[in-house]
Image (cartoon, rainbow, N blue to C red):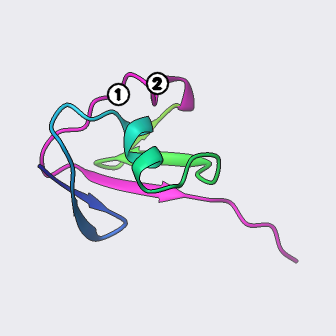
Amino acid sequence: MNIIINGEIKQFDENITLNRVLQELSLEGKVMAAAVNMDIVKQSEWNTYILQNSDKLELLDFVGGG
């Protein structure tokens, strides 16, 4: 199935969790927030949140600056 991640189409197996996507992209521990179809998904739900074909996933990392 296709998932659009930060504007780029990626292919994954069906019934994949948000956490598994982060693992496959080697982003575990780097992502601070995730939104699926413009809805924030709490980190406590990443292990059980199953993505659907054509979902739009935005992964955010907060950067400090001055």
Please state if 19 lies on the left or on the right of 17 as rendered: right
Which element type, helix, strand or loop, lies under badge 2?
A: helix
Residue drawn at 25 percent across, 37 percent down: 51
Front residue of this view, candidates 52 and 16: 16
The answer to whether 19 appears left or right of 7 in the picture is: right
Percent of width and height locating residue 29: 64, 46
* Residue type, numbered disc 2: Glu
> Is 25 or 49 nearer to us in this picture?
25
Residue at numbered disc 1: 49
Residue 13 drawn above or below residue 9: above
Residue 38: x and y, percent? 34, 49
Asked which quadrant contains residue 56, the reply is bottom left
> In the current view of this chain or complex, which residue is farthest to the bottom?
66
Q: Position of residue 25 (x, y in %)?
A: 43, 56
Residue position marked by numbered label 2 in the rendering: 45
Whole-percent x, y for residue 23 in the image: 46, 45
